[in-house]
Image (cartoon, coloured by chain):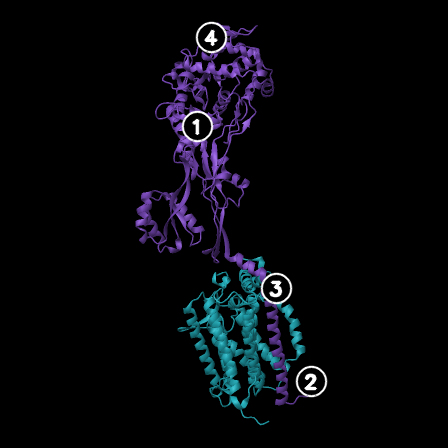
Chain colours: A purple, B cyan
Amino acid sequence: MFRGAPLRNPQWENHLFRRRVIVAAVFSAALLTFIIIRLFFLQVVNHEHYTTLSRNNRVDILPIAPTRGLIYDRNGVIVAENQPTFSLEIVPERVDDMEATLTAIRELISVSDSDLERFRQILRRKRRFEEIPLRLRLGDEEVARVAVNRYRLPGVEIKSRLARDYPLGPLLAHTLGYVGRIDERELQRLDTSNYAATAHIGKTGVERTYENQLHGSVGYQQVETNARGRILRVLERTPPVPGRNLHLNIDVRLQQTAQAAFGVEHGALVAIDPSDGAVLALVSLPSFDPNLFVNGIDSASYDALANSRDQPLFNRALNGQYPPGSTIKTLYGLLGLETGEIRPDTQIWDPGFFMLKGDERRYRDWRKEGHGWVDFNKSIVESCDTFYYDLALTLGIDRMSEFMRAFGFGKPTGIDLTGESSGLMPSREWKRQAYRQPWFPGETLITGIGQGFTLATPLQLASSTATLASFGRHLTPTVVAALEEPDSDVRTPLTAREVAPVRVLDQANWQRVHRAMINVVHSPVGTARGISRNLPYTIAGKTGTAQVFGIKQDEEYVAEDVAKHLRDHALFVAFAPAEKPRIAIAVIVQNGGGGGAVAAPIARTVMDTYLLGADGKLREEFR
Amino acid sequence: MILLDEPQHSRRTLLPRLHLDWPLLTGLLLLAGCGLVVLYSASGEDFDMVLKQVTRLSLAFATLFFLAQVPPEALRRWTPLFFVLGLTLLLAVLVMGEVGKGAQRWLDIGLVRFQPSEMMKLAVPLMVAWYLAETPLPPPLRRILVGLFIFLVPAVLIAKQPDLGTALLIASAGAFVLLFAGLPWRLVSFTALLAIPVALLLWHFGMHDYQRQRVLTFINPESDPLGAGYHIIQSTIAIGSGGLYGKGWLNGTQSHLEFLPERHTDFIFAVIGEEFGLLGILLLLALYLFIILRCLYIASRAQDTFTRLLAGGLTMTFLVYVFVNVGMVTGLLPVVGVPLPLVSYGGSSMVTLMASFGMLMSIHTHRKLLRT
């Protein structure tokens, strides 16, 4: 079409150009239409999708930790609470001269080199508007010193946070346990959303068993953030639900009395109310300060605790497994009466030892010269061993084992604390499995006086004593009395679980055993007669001595000659008032020697504290 | 229809005597006004920034006014010298250019930092139009080849700086002049086919790593959501979340919470999309289309080949500006640094742009009396 065009034809050129302009106009419109189609897809078709993305961009959900429930003792004394702790934090973007600020702070309060080192490490990692902690756990004076100088320290802030605090320190450490930082293993079994803001979790004791109750539910706040993550405002807030408060059955006064009564001795004491299974006191000595664990214990302190010969971290009340010694003679006596193998007036002659037919070995009584003629009552009051060698041989290990298991020996009591040991009640079956050996008659004899294989925790001893005191009623020992809803007084009481009771054919047998136990304390020949002085109520008890050190046939045990840690454990179990028992106690004084002299006075002091009023008489509710 | 003049009226008004074209000027002023409103929001309500932009706009409009007074004949006379000067400066930048923004673009002349590539945005369409106007249209093949050479040399030099956006603008300015000159459509289709192997060659030999990265990111922005893909992802989120009516002025969360990068410069279009929605964008695009159509009308009314070609080329460059910027922000095109004309915050490109509108007004208002 261009062929034959003239050299210059303005009209032709104009015509050509105008056509191109029209093409250009159409082209422009087409390009813009193309863009509009794209925008239609972005803004109308996929609008929802992009709105979501835009919202996700700017809205962050931050969890808020709930406040942990408080713990009170039975009289309302607070034993675990949340205390504000102060930390010094720095917002880098508000600080003009970081070095000068750090120097100024170090002039005011002590900042260790390791604090500074950690601060500088975090400083490199975090964003400039986020606060970085420099010093944790400031004292009141340090807080005040920083506060006064705040005007010249821009960007320096004192932050307060709630931290678990155990105001009574070591006193209840083995009952309450403690909280500590959540570790990897716990993280895997936790409901991570509920623990999103929580740093601490119950590690042992009540803090652990009642973790779900104490923790509460996490709260959330929706915040608007900018591209760098700075929080600009809070859009919505769902407050956290604080954890429930716990009321313990434990009586702090009893704990204190017991701890004082032990003095420098090591050991354990458990007190239970036989009427409802409430654990009134749970003592394990020596103890430790649970506050050390709350914010992470340093390795030096931990090593000192863990490797100490005194084993302060070891919960003797729950995990200490001791031979129960003579304290269980009452139960074998009861079994003897029940089965008719002995009658209350049955007497045996005790020459000071017992011998099996066809065996040279002498099974010695603790009293070398013997007790003479012994009946059931005397066997308990003077704790005659020979009587029980004889009885055990008659009863046989099978009946003994079954009866003792009914009292809770050889299995966990089911207390609401974690990690309880189950002790050991030997049987033929057990011996075959553990030693691949048959049961020997001699083993039955020493089982009869609570030695040999038999092991029991102080908790089991206390629990079985409570069962004995309440005529066979068997309750699970319970530490926590009630849950309390936060911010209201609504309490949900927790009742002890009933376990199958110990049934007897002749109810009078309970009375016979009780009477014998009363005589242990109140008769002039009783092994615990020392504690009956000025006693305004009746105690039924039984002493015990657990051998730690085996002595040879021809040797004699002389306490002074044996190293302290090889001496016998002193034991005492008791309940009072004997007519209407409200407290059952098991005491063990490690390497303490004789039960009557060492362990029984501790039990008496605790009972006095619990049962007596200010006037020195039995309190109203216990009469 | 204000796109077309009614001669008897316009001749009596003041603006033609000042060599200004009132519909075009109105369009430009409206656009600049809208731009300032958006900029206030996009800058995070920074009034100082808006004031600076007003200063630049004043300078740009002054340039427009000045160039509108220069008759097209004078432009034509100075074109070759202007082009040679521009090319020389461009070479100078390459040789001894100062490093700015990681790329060699700026030339320090005493106190003023000067970008020769900006100058070439005007010099190239002027030169191609000047060269093609020497012979009758449509141009013979030899002229076409020389014309190609005239705009490809500076385009390649600028692409080497590297400034892909400006190179693209300059190349398209020259190409559109050629198209307006009556380049046969057969040749156009042939070139389009040729573009494929050329693109492949460019990919392997002619591109910087970061340019290649941009293209890759364009194809799949999700591949690098926090790096190179971040711009495109955040701008599409901003635009998409704006919906039909937008979130309202100053209420765009993407821009105000700083998720959107370059929000007051190259990505300001996303702020408009977010705060004013599709309706706001349609209004803005309508304004752009009005300016383009008015300029095309001016081109069609131009009286000689040089002015026609120049007007057409300048107009289509403006279109390319808008399309490349919006295409990039909406994720249709890879990210190349092209501002949204008259709205984006920034100086030198705006002055150049207004200079081209000044030339267009000059073409429209300096009319020879012709006998028909």
Query: Mark 4 packing: few (<14 Cα in 10 Å), some, or many (20+)?
Result: few
Chain letter belonging to callout 1: A
> As displayed, is residue A472 above or below residue B203?
above
Horizontal side of residue A394 vs A87, given as left or right: right
Q: Earlier in the sequence, mark 4 or mark 1?
A: 1
Answer yes or no: are tags 2 and 1 on the same subunit: yes
Counting from the top left corner in percent of width and height, residue B199 is at 62, 68
Q: Which residue is mark 1?
A: A281
As measured in the structure, the alpha-carbon distance from the residue carrying label 2 to the one carrying label 3 is 47 Å
Q: Amino acid at mark 2?
A: Met
Residue A554: image tag: 4
The quadrant of the rendering that contains the N terminus of chain A is bottom right
Distance (Cα) linking label 1 and label 3: 71 Å
Chain containing the residue with disc 2 = A
For mark 3, give the secondary structure.
helix
Q: Position of residue B329 (x, y in %)?
A: 55, 66
CB under 8 Å between callouts 4 and 3?
Answer: no
* Numbered disc 4: secondary structure: loop
Q: The disc numbered 4 marks a residue on which chain?
A: A
Mark carried by residue A45: 3
Q: Which mark is residue A450?
A: none
Amino acid type of the residue that numbered disc 1 sits on in the rendered structure: Ala
Instruction: For marks 4 and 2, give the one nearer the viewer.
Output: 4
Q: Are marks 4 and 2 in contact (CB under 8 Å)?
A: no
Q: Tell me if mark 2 has few (under 14), some (14-19) or many (20+) residues whose alpha carbon lies within 10 angstroms of its own.
A: few
Q: Which mark is residue A1?
A: 2
Q: Earlier in the sequence, mark 2 or mark 1?
A: 2
Residues beneath discs 1 and 3 located on the same chain: yes
